[in-house]
Amino acid sequence: MSGKPQIFTDIEAAMRRSDMATAMLLAREALDQGLRHPLLFQLRAAWHEDQGQPADACADLEAGLAMKPGDPRMLNALGRCRTALGDYLPALTALRAALHADPGLAVAHYNEGSIWEQVGDFEQALAAYERALANDPELSDAAARLAFIAAQHGDLARARETADGVLTREPRHPVAAFAHIAGDLAEGRFEEAETRARKIMTDPRTTAQARMHATAYTADALDGRGQFDDAFRLYRQAKDGLADILHDRPGSEALETGRMLAQRLAREMAPLADAEHWEAPADNTAAQAEGLVFLVGFPHSGTQMLGRILSAHPRALVLNDRALLHHAAEEFIRKPDSLARLAKITAAHADQLRGAFWAAVRDLGADARGKVLIDQSATNLLYLPLIAKLFPAARVVFAARDPRDGVLDCFRTVSAISAHAYDFLTLDGAARYYDETMRLDALYRANLRLPRLDMRHEALAGDFDTQSRALCEFAGLAWDPALRGFASRKGLRSEGGSRWHDYAANLAPVLPLLAPWVERFGYEP
Protein backbone atom coordinates (compact mmCIF):
# COMPACT_ATOMS: atom_id res chain seq x y z
CA MET A 1 0.00 0.00 0.00
CA SER A 2 2.82 2.43 -0.88
CA GLY A 3 1.65 6.04 -1.00
CA LYS A 4 -1.15 5.33 1.43
CA PRO A 5 -1.53 7.09 4.77
CA GLN A 6 0.50 5.77 7.72
CA ILE A 7 -2.55 4.11 9.24
CA PHE A 8 -2.54 1.54 6.43
CA THR A 9 1.04 0.60 7.28
CA ASP A 10 0.01 0.22 10.92
CA ILE A 11 -2.94 -1.98 9.92
CA GLU A 12 -0.70 -4.20 7.79
CA ALA A 13 1.77 -4.55 10.64
CA ALA A 14 -1.00 -5.53 13.05
CA MET A 15 -2.29 -8.13 10.61
CA ARG A 16 1.18 -9.61 10.09
CA ARG A 17 1.48 -10.23 13.82
CA SER A 18 -2.12 -11.61 13.88
CA ASP A 19 -3.29 -8.75 16.09
CA MET A 20 -6.72 -8.48 14.49
CA ALA A 21 -8.18 -6.47 17.38
CA THR A 22 -5.74 -3.64 16.66
CA ALA A 23 -6.25 -3.96 12.89
CA MET A 24 -10.02 -3.66 13.28
CA LEU A 25 -9.68 -0.69 15.65
CA LEU A 26 -7.40 1.14 13.24
CA ALA A 27 -9.73 0.39 10.32
CA ARG A 28 -12.65 1.91 12.21
CA GLU A 29 -10.57 4.98 13.00
CA ALA A 30 -9.54 5.32 9.35
CA LEU A 31 -13.15 5.14 8.15
CA ASP A 32 -14.18 7.68 10.79
CA GLN A 33 -11.49 9.97 9.36
CA GLY A 34 -13.08 9.70 5.92
CA LEU A 35 -10.65 7.24 4.35
CA ARG A 36 -12.14 4.65 2.01
CA HIS A 37 -10.59 1.33 0.98
CA PRO A 38 -11.97 -2.24 0.62
CA LEU A 39 -9.69 -3.52 3.38
CA LEU A 40 -11.01 -0.93 5.82
CA PHE A 41 -14.61 -1.97 5.14
CA GLN A 42 -13.65 -5.63 5.38
CA LEU A 43 -12.01 -5.14 8.78
CA ARG A 44 -14.82 -3.02 10.18
CA ALA A 45 -17.27 -5.64 8.95
CA ALA A 46 -15.31 -8.25 10.91
CA TRP A 47 -15.60 -6.04 13.99
CA HIS A 48 -19.36 -5.65 13.50
CA GLU A 49 -19.65 -9.41 13.13
CA ASP A 50 -17.73 -9.95 16.38
CA GLN A 51 -20.09 -7.51 18.08
CA GLY A 52 -23.14 -9.47 16.92
CA GLN A 53 -24.16 -6.83 14.35
CA PRO A 54 -24.48 -8.80 11.09
CA ALA A 55 -26.63 -6.18 9.36
CA ASP A 56 -23.93 -3.52 9.84
CA ALA A 57 -21.30 -6.04 8.75
CA CYS A 58 -23.25 -6.69 5.54
CA ALA A 59 -23.44 -2.95 4.81
CA ASP A 60 -19.65 -2.62 5.16
CA LEU A 61 -18.98 -5.68 3.03
CA GLU A 62 -21.26 -4.41 0.29
CA ALA A 63 -19.41 -1.07 0.39
CA GLY A 64 -16.11 -2.93 0.09
CA LEU A 65 -17.39 -5.05 -2.77
CA ALA A 66 -18.54 -1.94 -4.62
CA MET A 67 -14.88 -0.91 -4.64
CA LYS A 68 -13.48 -4.39 -5.27
CA PRO A 69 -16.15 -6.47 -7.06
CA GLY A 70 -15.82 -10.23 -6.98
CA ASP A 71 -13.43 -10.41 -4.02
CA PRO A 72 -13.94 -14.00 -2.78
CA ARG A 73 -13.04 -13.30 0.85
CA MET A 74 -15.50 -10.44 1.16
CA LEU A 75 -18.18 -12.40 -0.68
CA ASN A 76 -17.64 -15.31 1.69
CA ALA A 77 -17.95 -12.99 4.70
CA LEU A 78 -21.09 -11.46 3.19
CA GLY A 79 -22.61 -14.92 2.80
CA ARG A 80 -21.79 -15.74 6.41
CA CYS A 81 -23.33 -12.51 7.70
CA ARG A 82 -26.43 -12.89 5.52
CA THR A 83 -26.82 -16.35 7.02
CA ALA A 84 -26.69 -14.86 10.51
CA LEU A 85 -29.61 -12.63 9.51
CA GLY A 86 -31.58 -15.61 8.18
CA ASP A 87 -31.36 -14.25 4.62
CA TYR A 88 -30.46 -17.61 3.15
CA LEU A 89 -31.00 -16.95 -0.54
CA PRO A 90 -28.86 -13.78 -0.64
CA ALA A 91 -26.31 -15.66 1.46
CA LEU A 92 -26.17 -18.51 -1.06
CA THR A 93 -25.84 -16.02 -3.91
CA ALA A 94 -22.84 -14.40 -2.22
CA LEU A 95 -21.19 -17.73 -1.43
CA ARG A 96 -21.67 -19.03 -4.94
CA ALA A 97 -20.08 -15.85 -6.28
CA ALA A 98 -17.17 -16.40 -3.89
CA LEU A 99 -16.75 -19.97 -5.12
CA HIS A 100 -16.99 -18.87 -8.73
CA ALA A 101 -14.06 -16.55 -8.05
CA ASP A 102 -12.16 -19.11 -5.98
CA PRO A 103 -13.51 -22.69 -6.28
CA GLY A 104 -11.00 -23.92 -3.71
CA LEU A 105 -12.09 -21.56 -0.94
CA ALA A 106 -12.85 -24.20 1.68
CA VAL A 107 -14.51 -21.84 4.16
CA ALA A 108 -17.06 -20.81 1.53
CA HIS A 109 -18.00 -24.46 0.98
CA TYR A 110 -18.26 -24.77 4.76
CA ASN A 111 -20.52 -21.72 5.05
CA GLU A 112 -22.72 -23.08 2.29
CA GLY A 113 -23.02 -26.31 4.26
CA SER A 114 -24.07 -24.28 7.30
CA ILE A 115 -26.96 -22.78 5.34
CA TRP A 116 -28.17 -26.15 4.09
CA GLU A 117 -27.93 -27.53 7.62
CA GLN A 118 -29.96 -24.67 9.05
CA VAL A 119 -32.77 -25.10 6.52
CA GLY A 120 -32.86 -28.85 7.05
CA ASP A 121 -31.36 -30.07 3.77
CA PHE A 122 -28.82 -32.41 5.31
CA GLU A 123 -27.79 -34.13 2.07
CA GLN A 124 -26.72 -30.80 0.58
CA ALA A 125 -25.06 -29.87 3.87
CA LEU A 126 -23.02 -33.07 3.92
CA ALA A 127 -21.98 -32.57 0.30
CA ALA A 128 -20.84 -29.01 1.03
CA TYR A 129 -18.87 -30.05 4.11
CA GLU A 130 -17.24 -32.82 2.10
CA ARG A 131 -16.21 -30.28 -0.57
CA ALA A 132 -14.78 -28.09 2.17
CA LEU A 133 -12.72 -30.98 3.49
CA ALA A 134 -11.58 -31.95 0.00
CA ASN A 135 -10.08 -28.47 -0.31
CA ASP A 136 -8.81 -28.30 3.27
CA PRO A 137 -8.61 -31.67 5.07
CA GLU A 138 -7.61 -29.87 8.29
CA LEU A 139 -10.81 -27.78 8.44
CA SER A 140 -11.98 -29.19 11.75
CA ASP A 141 -15.27 -27.28 11.84
CA ALA A 142 -16.42 -28.93 8.61
CA ALA A 143 -15.48 -32.40 9.84
CA ALA A 144 -17.21 -31.77 13.16
CA ARG A 145 -20.43 -30.61 11.50
CA LEU A 146 -20.30 -33.64 9.21
CA ALA A 147 -19.95 -35.89 12.26
CA PHE A 148 -22.82 -34.14 14.02
CA ILE A 149 -25.18 -34.57 11.06
CA ALA A 150 -24.20 -38.23 10.76
CA ALA A 151 -25.02 -38.74 14.45
CA GLN A 152 -28.39 -37.05 14.12
CA HIS A 153 -29.29 -39.30 11.21
CA GLY A 154 -28.25 -42.59 12.74
CA ASP A 155 -24.91 -43.13 11.01
CA LEU A 156 -23.21 -43.47 14.36
CA ALA A 157 -20.13 -45.34 13.16
CA ARG A 158 -19.24 -42.54 10.74
CA ALA A 159 -20.15 -39.91 13.32
CA ARG A 160 -17.87 -41.31 15.99
CA GLU A 161 -14.97 -42.00 13.65
CA THR A 162 -15.10 -38.50 12.17
CA ALA A 163 -15.54 -36.87 15.57
CA ASP A 164 -12.56 -38.77 16.95
CA GLY A 165 -10.44 -37.50 14.07
CA VAL A 166 -11.34 -33.92 14.99
CA LEU A 167 -10.81 -34.47 18.72
CA THR A 168 -7.37 -35.94 18.07
CA ARG A 169 -6.34 -32.58 16.59
CA GLU A 170 -8.51 -30.37 18.82
CA PRO A 171 -9.42 -32.22 22.02
CA ARG A 172 -11.88 -29.55 23.15
CA HIS A 173 -13.77 -29.05 19.87
CA PRO A 174 -17.37 -28.73 21.15
CA VAL A 175 -19.24 -29.77 17.99
CA ALA A 176 -17.16 -32.94 17.65
CA ALA A 177 -17.97 -33.72 21.27
CA PHE A 178 -21.63 -32.96 20.58
CA ALA A 179 -21.57 -35.57 17.79
CA HIS A 180 -20.56 -38.18 20.37
CA ILE A 181 -23.23 -36.91 22.77
CA ALA A 182 -25.91 -37.12 20.06
CA GLY A 183 -24.78 -40.69 19.41
CA ASP A 184 -24.96 -41.52 23.11
CA LEU A 185 -28.48 -40.13 23.35
CA ALA A 186 -29.58 -42.05 20.24
CA GLU A 187 -28.27 -45.28 21.74
CA GLY A 188 -29.86 -44.62 25.14
CA ARG A 189 -26.47 -44.21 26.82
CA PHE A 190 -27.70 -41.35 28.95
CA GLU A 191 -25.04 -41.52 31.65
CA GLU A 192 -22.26 -41.32 29.04
CA ALA A 193 -24.02 -38.41 27.34
CA GLU A 194 -24.35 -36.57 30.65
CA THR A 195 -20.69 -37.12 31.51
CA ARG A 196 -19.50 -35.75 28.17
CA ALA A 197 -21.88 -32.77 28.31
CA ARG A 198 -21.00 -31.82 31.87
CA LYS A 199 -17.30 -31.90 30.97
CA ILE A 200 -17.93 -29.22 28.35
CA MET A 201 -20.20 -27.26 30.69
CA THR A 202 -17.59 -27.02 33.42
CA ASP A 203 -14.55 -26.33 31.23
CA PRO A 204 -13.72 -22.62 31.75
CA ARG A 205 -12.33 -22.47 28.20
CA THR A 206 -15.71 -23.36 26.66
CA THR A 207 -17.35 -20.46 24.85
CA ALA A 208 -20.57 -19.14 26.34
CA GLN A 209 -22.74 -20.37 23.47
CA ALA A 210 -21.16 -23.85 23.42
CA ARG A 211 -21.68 -24.04 27.20
CA MET A 212 -25.38 -23.39 26.73
CA HIS A 213 -25.63 -26.15 24.13
CA ALA A 214 -23.80 -28.51 26.50
CA THR A 215 -26.23 -27.54 29.26
CA ALA A 216 -29.17 -28.44 27.03
CA TYR A 217 -27.55 -31.77 26.16
CA THR A 218 -27.14 -32.47 29.86
CA ALA A 219 -30.85 -31.77 30.21
CA ASP A 220 -31.59 -34.18 27.33
CA ALA A 221 -29.63 -36.87 29.15
CA LEU A 222 -31.57 -36.26 32.36
CA ASP A 223 -34.81 -36.33 30.36
CA GLY A 224 -33.82 -39.72 28.97
CA ARG A 225 -33.37 -40.99 32.53
CA GLY A 226 -36.78 -39.68 33.61
CA GLN A 227 -35.41 -36.86 35.78
CA PHE A 228 -37.82 -34.31 34.32
CA ASP A 229 -37.67 -31.59 36.97
CA ASP A 230 -33.86 -31.55 36.88
CA ALA A 231 -33.95 -31.56 33.08
CA PHE A 232 -36.35 -28.63 32.99
CA ARG A 233 -34.13 -26.65 35.35
CA LEU A 234 -31.18 -27.11 33.00
CA TYR A 235 -33.24 -26.26 29.90
CA ARG A 236 -34.14 -23.01 31.64
CA GLN A 237 -30.49 -22.44 32.58
CA ALA A 238 -29.44 -22.92 28.95
CA LYS A 239 -32.05 -20.46 27.72
CA ASP A 240 -31.12 -17.91 30.40
CA GLY A 241 -27.52 -18.13 29.24
CA LEU A 242 -28.51 -17.60 25.61
CA ALA A 243 -30.59 -14.60 26.65
CA ASP A 244 -27.54 -13.11 28.37
CA ILE A 245 -25.51 -13.57 25.20
CA LEU A 246 -28.18 -11.87 23.10
CA HIS A 247 -28.68 -8.99 25.52
CA ASP A 248 -24.94 -8.28 25.47
CA ARG A 249 -25.15 -7.60 21.75
CA PRO A 250 -25.58 -3.94 20.73
CA GLY A 251 -28.93 -3.24 19.13
CA SER A 252 -30.67 -6.28 20.58
CA GLU A 253 -33.26 -4.05 22.23
CA ALA A 254 -34.42 -2.94 18.76
CA LEU A 255 -35.27 -6.46 17.57
CA GLU A 256 -38.80 -7.10 16.37
CA THR A 257 -39.27 -10.59 17.75
CA GLY A 258 -41.58 -13.17 16.26
CA ARG A 259 -44.21 -12.46 18.88
CA MET A 260 -43.94 -8.71 18.29
CA LEU A 261 -44.35 -9.30 14.55
CA ALA A 262 -47.49 -11.38 15.16
CA GLN A 263 -48.90 -8.64 17.41
CA ARG A 264 -48.20 -5.92 14.87
CA LEU A 265 -49.68 -7.89 11.98
CA ALA A 266 -52.83 -8.55 14.03
CA ARG A 267 -53.20 -4.81 14.66
CA GLU A 268 -52.71 -4.10 10.97
CA MET A 269 -55.09 -6.87 9.93
CA ALA A 270 -57.96 -5.77 12.19
CA PRO A 271 -59.12 -2.78 10.06
CA LEU A 272 -58.64 -4.88 6.92
CA ALA A 273 -60.89 -7.69 8.13
CA ASP A 274 -62.83 -7.97 4.91
CA ALA A 275 -62.14 -10.63 2.31
CA GLU A 276 -62.46 -8.05 -0.47
CA HIS A 277 -59.21 -6.47 0.66
CA TRP A 278 -57.44 -9.71 -0.20
CA GLU A 279 -58.71 -10.33 -3.70
CA ALA A 280 -55.82 -10.79 -6.10
CA PRO A 281 -55.28 -10.94 -9.85
CA ALA A 282 -54.65 -14.36 -11.34
CA ASP A 283 -51.11 -15.55 -10.75
CA ASN A 284 -48.67 -17.25 -13.11
CA THR A 285 -48.17 -20.43 -11.10
CA ALA A 286 -49.38 -22.61 -13.95
CA ALA A 287 -46.49 -21.47 -16.11
CA GLN A 288 -43.94 -22.36 -13.45
CA ALA A 289 -45.28 -25.52 -11.75
CA GLU A 290 -48.31 -27.78 -11.78
CA GLY A 291 -49.27 -26.54 -8.35
CA LEU A 292 -48.06 -24.59 -5.35
CA VAL A 293 -48.51 -25.65 -1.73
CA PHE A 294 -47.35 -23.84 1.41
CA LEU A 295 -46.73 -25.96 4.51
CA VAL A 296 -47.15 -23.67 7.52
CA GLY A 297 -47.58 -23.92 11.27
CA PHE A 298 -46.10 -22.88 14.56
CA PRO A 299 -42.48 -24.04 15.01
CA HIS A 300 -42.13 -27.64 16.20
CA SER A 301 -45.66 -28.46 15.10
CA GLY A 302 -44.82 -30.75 12.18
CA THR A 303 -44.14 -28.71 9.04
CA GLN A 304 -40.75 -30.37 8.53
CA MET A 305 -42.27 -33.80 9.02
CA LEU A 306 -44.96 -33.10 6.40
CA GLY A 307 -42.28 -31.84 4.04
CA ARG A 308 -40.25 -35.02 4.43
CA ILE A 309 -43.33 -37.15 3.83
CA LEU A 310 -44.21 -35.30 0.63
CA SER A 311 -40.60 -35.29 -0.56
CA ALA A 312 -40.98 -39.04 -1.13
CA HIS A 313 -43.58 -38.34 -3.82
CA PRO A 314 -42.11 -38.44 -7.35
CA ARG A 315 -44.17 -35.43 -8.48
CA ALA A 316 -43.47 -33.23 -5.47
CA LEU A 317 -40.61 -30.73 -5.25
CA VAL A 318 -40.16 -29.83 -1.59
CA LEU A 319 -38.06 -26.80 -0.66
CA ASN A 320 -37.47 -26.52 3.07
CA ASP A 321 -37.13 -23.12 4.76
CA ARG A 322 -35.61 -21.49 1.68
CA ALA A 323 -37.10 -18.02 2.34
CA LEU A 324 -38.54 -17.92 -1.18
CA LEU A 325 -40.76 -15.01 -0.12
CA HIS A 326 -37.80 -13.05 1.27
CA HIS A 327 -38.00 -10.04 -1.06
CA ALA A 328 -41.77 -9.73 -0.82
CA ALA A 329 -41.74 -10.14 2.95
CA GLU A 330 -39.08 -7.45 3.40
CA GLU A 331 -41.38 -5.00 1.65
CA PHE A 332 -44.83 -6.08 2.78
CA ILE A 333 -44.40 -7.87 6.11
CA ARG A 334 -41.31 -6.59 7.87
CA LYS A 335 -42.07 -2.86 7.65
CA PRO A 336 -44.69 -0.99 9.73
CA ASP A 337 -48.11 -0.55 8.11
CA SER A 338 -47.12 -3.16 5.56
CA LEU A 339 -50.51 -4.91 5.34
CA ALA A 340 -52.33 -1.68 4.44
CA ARG A 341 -49.94 -1.24 1.54
CA LEU A 342 -50.16 -4.90 0.60
CA ALA A 343 -53.96 -4.70 0.41
CA LYS A 344 -53.57 -2.09 -2.35
CA ILE A 345 -50.76 -3.75 -4.28
CA THR A 346 -51.00 -3.26 -8.04
CA ALA A 347 -51.14 -6.15 -10.48
CA ALA A 348 -47.80 -5.08 -11.95
CA HIS A 349 -46.10 -5.03 -8.55
CA ALA A 350 -47.59 -8.41 -7.66
CA ASP A 351 -46.23 -9.83 -10.92
CA GLN A 352 -42.80 -8.43 -10.09
CA LEU A 353 -42.79 -10.13 -6.67
CA ARG A 354 -44.03 -13.41 -8.15
CA GLY A 355 -41.16 -13.20 -10.58
CA ALA A 356 -38.73 -12.80 -7.66
CA PHE A 357 -40.25 -15.87 -6.00
CA TRP A 358 -39.78 -18.07 -9.05
CA ALA A 359 -36.34 -16.62 -9.69
CA ALA A 360 -35.41 -17.67 -6.15
CA VAL A 361 -36.58 -21.21 -6.96
CA ARG A 362 -34.39 -21.27 -10.06
CA ASP A 363 -31.44 -19.78 -8.15
CA LEU A 364 -31.57 -22.87 -5.95
CA GLY A 365 -31.11 -25.03 -9.02
CA ALA A 366 -34.66 -26.34 -8.70
CA ASP A 367 -36.95 -27.03 -11.67
CA ALA A 368 -40.61 -27.07 -10.66
CA ARG A 369 -42.02 -27.63 -14.13
CA GLY A 370 -44.21 -30.71 -14.21
CA LYS A 371 -44.20 -30.92 -10.41
CA VAL A 372 -46.10 -29.54 -7.46
CA LEU A 373 -43.86 -27.11 -5.59
CA ILE A 374 -44.07 -27.50 -1.81
CA ASP A 375 -42.72 -24.48 0.10
CA GLN A 376 -42.18 -25.71 3.67
CA SER A 377 -41.60 -22.96 6.20
CA ALA A 378 -43.28 -22.44 9.55
CA THR A 379 -42.59 -18.70 9.20
CA ASN A 380 -44.93 -18.50 6.22
CA LEU A 381 -47.86 -18.81 8.63
CA LEU A 382 -47.29 -15.11 9.40
CA TYR A 383 -47.06 -14.32 5.68
CA LEU A 384 -50.45 -15.66 4.57
CA PRO A 385 -51.84 -12.27 3.41
CA LEU A 386 -48.80 -11.99 1.15
CA ILE A 387 -49.45 -15.47 -0.21
CA ALA A 388 -53.13 -14.62 -0.76
CA LYS A 389 -52.20 -11.57 -2.82
CA LEU A 390 -49.45 -13.18 -4.85
CA PHE A 391 -50.67 -16.76 -5.19
CA PRO A 392 -54.45 -16.90 -4.74
CA ALA A 393 -54.58 -20.39 -6.28
CA ALA A 394 -52.02 -21.76 -3.82
CA ARG A 395 -53.06 -24.29 -1.19
CA VAL A 396 -52.12 -24.05 2.47
CA VAL A 397 -51.49 -27.04 4.72
CA PHE A 398 -51.51 -26.09 8.40
CA ALA A 399 -49.50 -28.44 10.61
CA ALA A 400 -51.35 -28.85 13.90
CA ARG A 401 -49.96 -30.39 17.05
CA ASP A 402 -50.98 -30.33 20.69
CA PRO A 403 -50.05 -26.74 21.70
CA ARG A 404 -48.52 -27.98 24.95
CA ASP A 405 -46.09 -30.23 23.11
CA GLY A 406 -45.22 -27.59 20.52
CA VAL A 407 -44.50 -24.91 23.10
CA LEU A 408 -42.52 -27.33 25.28
CA ASP A 409 -40.32 -28.36 22.34
CA CYS A 410 -39.73 -24.73 21.37
CA PHE A 411 -38.50 -24.09 24.91
CA ARG A 412 -36.40 -27.27 25.15
CA THR A 413 -34.65 -26.74 21.81
CA VAL A 414 -31.46 -24.67 21.82
CA SER A 415 -31.06 -23.14 18.38
CA ALA A 416 -29.32 -20.21 16.76
CA ILE A 417 -30.09 -16.91 18.43
CA SER A 418 -32.39 -14.88 16.18
CA ALA A 419 -35.27 -12.44 16.38
CA HIS A 420 -37.64 -15.19 15.27
CA ALA A 421 -36.54 -17.53 18.09
CA TYR A 422 -36.12 -14.86 20.76
CA ASP A 423 -39.44 -15.60 22.43
CA PHE A 424 -38.43 -19.24 22.91
CA LEU A 425 -35.85 -18.15 25.48
CA THR A 426 -38.54 -18.43 28.16
CA LEU A 427 -41.47 -20.79 28.55
CA ASP A 428 -43.82 -17.85 29.08
CA GLY A 429 -42.48 -16.16 25.94
CA ALA A 430 -42.98 -19.31 23.87
CA ALA A 431 -46.56 -19.72 25.11
CA ARG A 432 -47.41 -16.06 24.48
CA TYR A 433 -45.87 -16.24 21.02
CA TYR A 434 -48.04 -19.27 20.30
CA ASP A 435 -51.15 -17.48 21.58
CA GLU A 436 -50.45 -14.33 19.54
CA THR A 437 -49.76 -16.37 16.41
CA MET A 438 -52.97 -18.36 16.71
CA ARG A 439 -54.97 -15.17 17.30
CA LEU A 440 -53.46 -13.74 14.14
CA ASP A 441 -54.20 -16.94 12.25
CA ALA A 442 -57.83 -16.76 13.36
CA LEU A 443 -58.04 -13.39 11.59
CA TYR A 444 -56.43 -14.91 8.53
CA ARG A 445 -58.82 -17.85 8.50
CA ALA A 446 -61.79 -15.51 8.63
CA ASN A 447 -60.65 -13.18 5.85
CA LEU A 448 -58.33 -14.95 3.44
CA ARG A 449 -59.83 -17.22 0.81
CA LEU A 450 -56.85 -19.52 0.50
CA PRO A 451 -57.76 -23.23 0.35
CA ARG A 452 -56.58 -24.75 3.61
CA LEU A 453 -56.16 -28.18 5.15
CA ASP A 454 -55.44 -28.73 8.85
CA MET A 455 -53.22 -31.79 9.31
CA ARG A 456 -52.92 -33.03 12.88
CA HIS A 457 -49.68 -34.76 13.75
CA GLU A 458 -51.39 -37.19 16.10
CA ALA A 459 -53.96 -38.23 13.46
CA LEU A 460 -51.17 -38.83 10.97
CA ALA A 461 -49.36 -41.02 13.47
CA GLY A 462 -52.54 -42.96 14.21
CA ASP A 463 -53.64 -43.66 10.63
CA PHE A 464 -50.84 -42.80 8.23
CA ASP A 465 -52.40 -44.13 5.03
CA THR A 466 -55.73 -42.32 5.43
CA GLN A 467 -54.17 -39.03 6.47
CA SER A 468 -51.39 -39.10 3.88
CA ARG A 469 -53.98 -39.80 1.17
CA ALA A 470 -55.94 -36.74 2.29
CA LEU A 471 -52.73 -34.71 2.26
CA CYS A 472 -51.86 -35.80 -1.27
CA GLU A 473 -55.35 -35.22 -2.58
CA PHE A 474 -55.42 -31.69 -1.18
CA ALA A 475 -51.97 -30.98 -2.63
CA GLY A 476 -53.08 -32.14 -6.08
CA LEU A 477 -51.02 -35.31 -6.00
CA ALA A 478 -52.13 -38.89 -6.54
CA TRP A 479 -51.23 -40.93 -3.48
CA ASP A 480 -48.05 -42.96 -3.96
CA PRO A 481 -46.96 -45.99 -1.87
CA ALA A 482 -43.48 -44.42 -1.65
CA LEU A 483 -44.85 -42.22 1.12
CA ARG A 484 -45.09 -45.24 3.40
CA GLY A 485 -41.31 -45.25 3.53
CA PHE A 486 -41.35 -42.33 5.94
CA ALA A 487 -43.68 -44.06 8.37
CA SER A 488 -41.69 -47.28 8.35
CA ARG A 489 -38.26 -45.65 8.42
CA LYS A 490 -38.79 -42.94 11.02
CA GLY A 491 -41.64 -44.03 13.17
CA LEU A 492 -44.14 -41.19 13.45
CA ARG A 493 -44.81 -41.75 17.12
CA SER A 494 -41.18 -41.09 18.01
CA GLU A 495 -40.90 -37.99 15.82
CA GLY A 496 -42.28 -35.12 17.84
CA GLY A 497 -44.28 -37.42 20.08
CA SER A 498 -46.33 -36.16 23.01
CA ARG A 499 -44.20 -35.36 26.05
CA TRP A 500 -46.00 -32.56 27.80
CA HIS A 501 -47.41 -34.81 30.55
CA ASP A 502 -43.84 -35.47 31.73
CA TYR A 503 -43.48 -31.74 32.32
CA ALA A 504 -47.04 -30.94 33.41
CA ALA A 505 -45.96 -29.35 36.70
CA ASN A 506 -43.38 -27.17 34.93
CA LEU A 507 -45.92 -26.18 32.27
CA ALA A 508 -48.58 -25.27 34.84
CA PRO A 509 -48.03 -21.47 34.61
CA VAL A 510 -48.76 -21.41 30.86
CA LEU A 511 -51.46 -24.07 30.58
CA PRO A 512 -54.34 -21.58 31.06
CA LEU A 513 -52.99 -19.49 28.17
CA LEU A 514 -52.82 -22.55 25.92
CA ALA A 515 -56.14 -24.06 27.03
CA PRO A 516 -58.32 -22.28 24.39
CA TRP A 517 -56.09 -23.59 21.63
CA VAL A 518 -56.00 -27.09 23.10
CA GLU A 519 -59.80 -27.01 22.86
CA ARG A 520 -59.83 -25.30 19.45
CA PHE A 521 -57.70 -28.05 17.88
CA GLY A 522 -59.60 -30.85 19.59
CA TYR A 523 -57.07 -32.14 22.12
CA GLU A 524 -57.94 -33.61 25.48
CA PRO A 525 -57.57 -31.10 28.35
Image: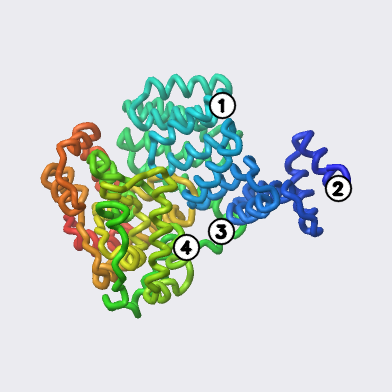
The number of numbered badges drawn on the structure is 4
Q: Nearer the viewer, residue 331 or 138?
A: 331
Mark closest to the chain's N terminus, 3 or 1: 1
Q: Which mark is residue 4?
A: 2
The three-letter amino acid code for the residue at tag 1 is Asn
Q: Residue at x 47, y 42 (%)?
A: 115
Cα gap from disc 3 to disc 1, whole angstroms:
37 Å
The three-letter amino acid code for the residue at tag 4 is Glu
* Residue 155 pos. (x, y %): 35, 25
Label 1 secondary element: helix
Cα gap from disc 4 to disc 1, whole angstroms:
36 Å
Mark closest to the chain's N terminus, 1 or 2: 2
Mark closest to the chain's N terminus, 4 or 1: 1
The three-letter amino acid code for the residue at tag 3 is Ser
Cα gap from disc 3 to disc 4, whole angstroms:
19 Å
Q: Nearer the viewer, residue 247 or 393?
A: 393
* Residue 313 pos. (x, y %): 22, 41
Q: Quadrant of the N terminus?
A: top right
| Viewer-side label of 3, 1 | 1
User: Label 4: how many residues lie within 10 Å, few (<14), some (14-19) or many (20+)?
Assistant: few
Q: Which mark is residue 330?
A: 4
Query: Which residue does the numbered mark 1 point to in the structure image?
Result: 135
Query: Which residue does the numbered mark 3 point to in the structure image?
Result: 252
Cα gap from disc 3 to disc 2, whole angstroms:
37 Å
